[in-house]
């Protein structure tokens, strides 16, 4: 079985490894290198680095129109968090089509940010779906799926890593049957579909005067590691990386030190801040941040 792989971030690496164990990977297609860090030097995507370790050929097309030429001669193309729409002319080339490893239980959370949306919505369960790509946005028929509970404290980063492993196992167990035509796809029910649009930085703004405790805690988890839930304290952005439910009485929108803990008042209760990151500084414990303020209360805006 000859296969192409399309993927970009860390979450796609376990799925690429699983594909390499059951197929001849003829090309690994990923996004172009991007400038990162203070130096601004171009850095390769994690999938490119992983492909290099295995000696698999890598292509980094700039235009989606180049994809058709890259997948000629393969039996199947496997996609995992590639980050670009695949045009119809490319979809028609592999005999078994394009098989997408999608991090949700389709048709719930079609789109670019299914893990973030699941946590924000308070879902208790998510999973991985194997589906055939079509020209819609995650609208193609599905081959199989595996479900898993969402942990009460799981962040998007934690859950994505776990789903990547589940997706790799599911692909390894089903791809040969898919390519052989022994596992026919089933159409999705469009009436049950929900959209998982891209995350905007503005969405990650915390307003404790308006947000209830449950919504605030979900936002902190959902926007970790990107872009980071944030608020503004004395004109500067403060990111909140970890928080937990707490008891006590603090004015909504104000953080105060109480008995060694840093408590933040929300619209309907209180949360304890655990890890924060002031602008231009590394992340730190909320206690260390409050010590730097000499214990002065902080107003979140």
Image (spheres, helix red, strand yellow):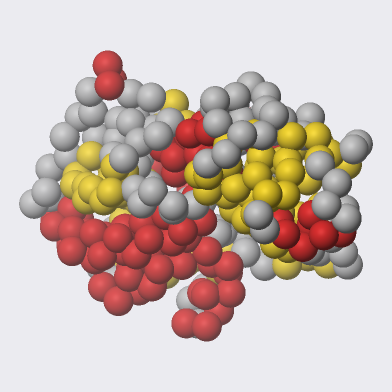
> What residue appears at the point 40 percent right and 34 percent down from the top-left corner?
122
Q: Is 193 above or below relative to 219?
A: above
Q: Quadrant of residue 291?
A: bottom right
Q: Is 192 above or below relative to 223?
A: above
> What residue appears at the point 20 percent right and 29 percent down from the top-left corner?
187
Where residue 144 appears, as percent x and y from the top left, is 19, 47
> What residue appears at the point 36 percent right and 56 percent down from the top-left corner?
163
Where residue 8 appears, as percent x and y from the top left, is 55, 58
Q: Is 271 above or below relative to 287?
A: above
Where residue 257 appears, as percent x and y from the top left, is 72, 49
> What residue appears at the point 18 percent right and 53 percent down from the top-left corner?
178
Q: In the visual, does 279 lie left or right of 14?
A: right
Q: In the visual, does 76 lie left or right of 52?
A: left
Where residue 100 appears, as percent x and y from the top left, is 35, 48
Mark yes or no: residue 51 visible. yes
Which residue is outermost to the top? 191
Q: In the visual, does 153 lie left or right of 171?
A: right
Q: Quadrant of residue 188?
A: top left
- Screen quadrant of the N terminus: bottom left
Residue sitting nearer the eye, 229 or 186: 229
Mark yes or no: residue 64 visible. no
Which residue is outermost to the front? 259
Residue sitting nearer the eye, 85 or 220: 220
Q: Count the marks.
A: 0
Which residue is outermost to the right? 235
Q: In the visual, does 290 lie left or right of 91?
A: right
Residue sitting nearer the eye, 53 or 201: 201
Q: Quadrant of residue 160?
A: bottom left
Q: Is 121 above or below relative to 127?
A: above
């Amino acid at each position: 079985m000859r296969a192409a792989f399309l993927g970009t971030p860390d979450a796609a690496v376990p799925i690429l490894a699983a594909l390499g164990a059951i197929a001849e990977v003829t090309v690994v297609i990923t996004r172009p290198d991007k400038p990162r860090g203070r130096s601004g030097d171009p850095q390769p995507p994690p999938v490119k680095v992983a492909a290099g370790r295995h000696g698999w050929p890598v292509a980094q097309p700039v235009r989606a129109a180049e994809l058709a030429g890259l997948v000629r001669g393969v039996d199947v193309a496997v996609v995992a968090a590639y980050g670009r729409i695949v045009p119809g002319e490319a979809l028609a080339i592999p005999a078994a089509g394009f098989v997408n490893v999608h991090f949700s239980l389709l048709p719930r959370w079609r789109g670019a940010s299914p893990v973030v949306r699941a946590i924000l919505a308070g879902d208790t369960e998510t999973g991985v779906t194997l589906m055939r790509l079509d020209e819609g946005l995650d609208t193609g028929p599905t081959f199989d799926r595996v479900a898993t509970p969402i942990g009460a404290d799981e962040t998007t980063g934690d859950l994505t890593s776990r789903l990547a492993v589940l997706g790799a196992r599911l692909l390894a167990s089903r791809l040969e049957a898919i390519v052989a035509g022994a596992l026919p796809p089933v159409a999705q029910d469009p009436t049950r579909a929900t959209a998982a649009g891209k995350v905007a930085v503005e969405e990650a703004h915390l307003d404790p005067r308006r947000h209830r405790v449950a919504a605030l805690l979900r936002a902190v988890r959902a926007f970790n590691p990107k872009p980071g839930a944030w608020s503004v304290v004395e004109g500067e952005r403060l990111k909140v990386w970890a928080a937990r439910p707490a008891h006590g009485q603090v004015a909504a929108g104000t953080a105060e030190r109480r008995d060694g803990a840093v408590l933040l008042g929300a619209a309907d209760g209180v949360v304890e801040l655990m890890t924060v990151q002031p602008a231009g500084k590394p992340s730190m414990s909320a206690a260390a941040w409050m010590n730097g303020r000499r214990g002065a209360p902080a107003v979140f805006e």
